[in-house]
Amino acid sequence: MTLEELMNIEVTTASLQSETMLKAPVPMTVITRDMINAIGARNMKEVLITYVPGITSVEDHNEMNVSMRGIYASSQQKILFLVNGQRLNSRAYSMANPDYSINLDKIRQIEVVRGPGSSLYGNVSLSAVINIITIDGAELEGTRVRVGTGSHGQVYVSAVAGAGLGENKDILVWGHHYAADGEKRAVNAADDYSSFTTQDGVAYLGTVQGDYDIGLQANIGKFDFFFNTTRGKIQQPFSDGGGTGELYNAGDFDEILGEEPGLGQEMRRVKVGYGTSFGKSVDFRIDLYGDNSNLFGNLVASGTPPINLAVFWWDRDLGGISQLTFNYGKGNVLIGTQVDWMNVYDSFFAQAAGGTGVLNTFLDTTVPLLEPGEETIYSAFTQWKHNLTDNLLINAGIRYDNKDRHEGENVTALSPRIAFIYEASESQNIKLSYSKSFVDAPYWYRYNSLASYSGSRDLKPENLQAVQLTLDSKLFYSSVFNNINFFYQSLTDFIYRDPNAGPADPKYRNAGSLTSWGIEEQVRTKLGDFDLMANATYQHAVNSKDYGVDDSKIANVPSFTANIIGTYHLSENVLFNLGARYVSEQFSPITALGTDTSIPDNYVDAAFILNTGVNVKIKDLVMDLRVKNLLDTRYYQGGATRFAYPQEGRWFTVSAQYTFKH
């Protein structure tokens, strides 16, 4: 893709209608199929932390997670993930983890709206919206099969098949499976900061237990159909129940109900859509959808003696979205409504002593793990897009959400956005925007029966406001595309875990706040056969309350990150890629267990990571060799954990892909 094509690439996520990236009302990052292939990404997290300014890695006890501009939770609950506009986040827990449950081979492009997104999308779109756009069946016209293996027991199988079925008709089906034994990193007993640990052990890094993504996307005239079933599960590096973060021996624990230690989620999604136009001035679309989610876990509560916990719950969802777009000479007006009903209908919680996998203590016989119930959100939204002059565009919208909660008063949210886009010249484009978003407190926090995870039943939504100034430029005779964005944001009513709460008191409450600013930079150029991309982010905390901050540094979030991705085409069919990532030192407090000493002012060192690979195409066969963390850099990352966890070392992956043409 040329630089000109990149700047004028069509996107739909920011305004719910097709527009060029330059005319989108807020800063965006678009990740193309070629960009994913260039770095040989294995999962969505690798894609996002490589290409999206502001997104950084954070650690959790048993989930793959990221932070956006310093905002994160123990699960990925602050960013709304979509596939072709269909929500991926679960309802009871609001989670959508960027793990191996997302098949990268089906993707045409990923559209990332950086900043609040609730003016169109409502709940969960607090800090960003990520929409995964699949390739069209007619675009593929064949079957693409890829198999791979690598160090640490990696196994990968993927197939994507598509075909055009006539005018405005096509079908795409996909399936993939990934598993890995993982890396076993030696850890001294003292380094899990628990006086209960007396023997050295290992941390389990990158152990993935049979993730998959199977789906279908079909377009038949004015109708479209989507079906998807996914599973994502990783093994906990350290214990993830009880005090958490302690060493354990996985061999001491049997399966529980067929599940090895770890936390996972299975989801099934279905959507039927219909779109039509009434003349040239009115467009109409309606989508009806349903989801079902099962969260399951074999949690390690203690390594010595071995004790594990079985955690399961099930929820479902039904809903619909309708929208009308009225087009006129200089713009359009969009109005829409949405109804979303969810229901938690079962849960299960038990304990197995001795690591046998035999459940001998049922902990939810009188009070369920997660209280059954239902909630409904009623929403209305509108957007006005108008060319004030030939060079000045306004894009303004607002959404109202009213949530009928399982108990207590309804929760309401008003989410506005206004943006001005000015085309100063053929090589300069300026955007100024203000937006507000929210994420409601997950059902899990409000209605679970675990003393260590309980929250107030009247927890309020978290709110984020942001002002952003974006400059897009073509430099050096249009040979360089540069994007720089300045943001100032204020997060309020952050759900904070109170360390001073009594045994019977709610552990989570709305008390936290964070005000911060930052600079995000993206640049791309092509020099003959060499394609160079780079991005960098600087973040600075201004003030905070009950939010981990030391001076201007946000806990477990680097103040500065940078990526440089270089791809050299040795020939038309051979490319070499080298990627470098720098992560600055991080404020990363340590919370100890037992008689060990906590270190509230701890910092982890900066890290420099190199990734490389070679891709060779021989007609319809593509061979790919990758090395992640080429220098085997030893580095650590904190997050919702008691201390910063060790990260994966050097991993090798080799794959072969063949396309069968129809």
Image (cartoon, rainbow, N blue to C red):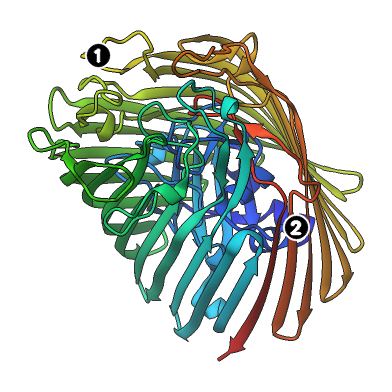
Q: Which residue is mark 1?
A: 503
- Name the residue type under label 1: Pro
Mark 2 or mark 1, which is nearer the start of the sequence?
A: 1
Viewer-side label of 1, 2: 1
Q: How many marks?
A: 2
Name which residue lies at 29% across and 21% down.
460
Q: Please state if 311 lies on the left or on the right of 658 as rendered.
A: left
- Seen in the picture, residue 638 relative to 425 is either above or below; the reply is above
| Quarter holding residue 119 | top left
Q: Secondary structure at mark 2?
A: strand
Q: Quadrant of the C terminus?
A: bottom right
Q: Quadrant of the N terminus?
A: bottom right
Q: Is residue 321 visible?
A: no
Marks 1/2: CA distance?
Answer: 48 Å
Name which residue lies at 65% across and 45% down.
648
- Name the residue type under label 2: Val
- Seen in the picture, residue 438 relative to 63 is either above or below; the reply is above
Q: Residue furthest bottom?
A: 662
Name which residue lies at 49% across and 15% down.
547
Q: Which residue is mark 2?
A: 627
Pointers 1 and 2 in contact (CB under 8 A)? no
Q: Residue furthest left?
A: 366
Q: Please state if 109 lies on the left or on the right of 486 as rendered.
A: left
Name which residue lies at 58% across and 20% down.
555
Q: Residues within 10 Å of mark 1 (few under 14, many from 20)?
A: few
The spot of residue 283 in percent (x, y) is: 37, 58
Q: Residues within 10 Å of mark 2 (few under 14, many from 20)?
A: many
- In-front residue for pair 227/255: 255
- Seen in the picture, residue 631 relative to 639 is either above or below; the reply is below
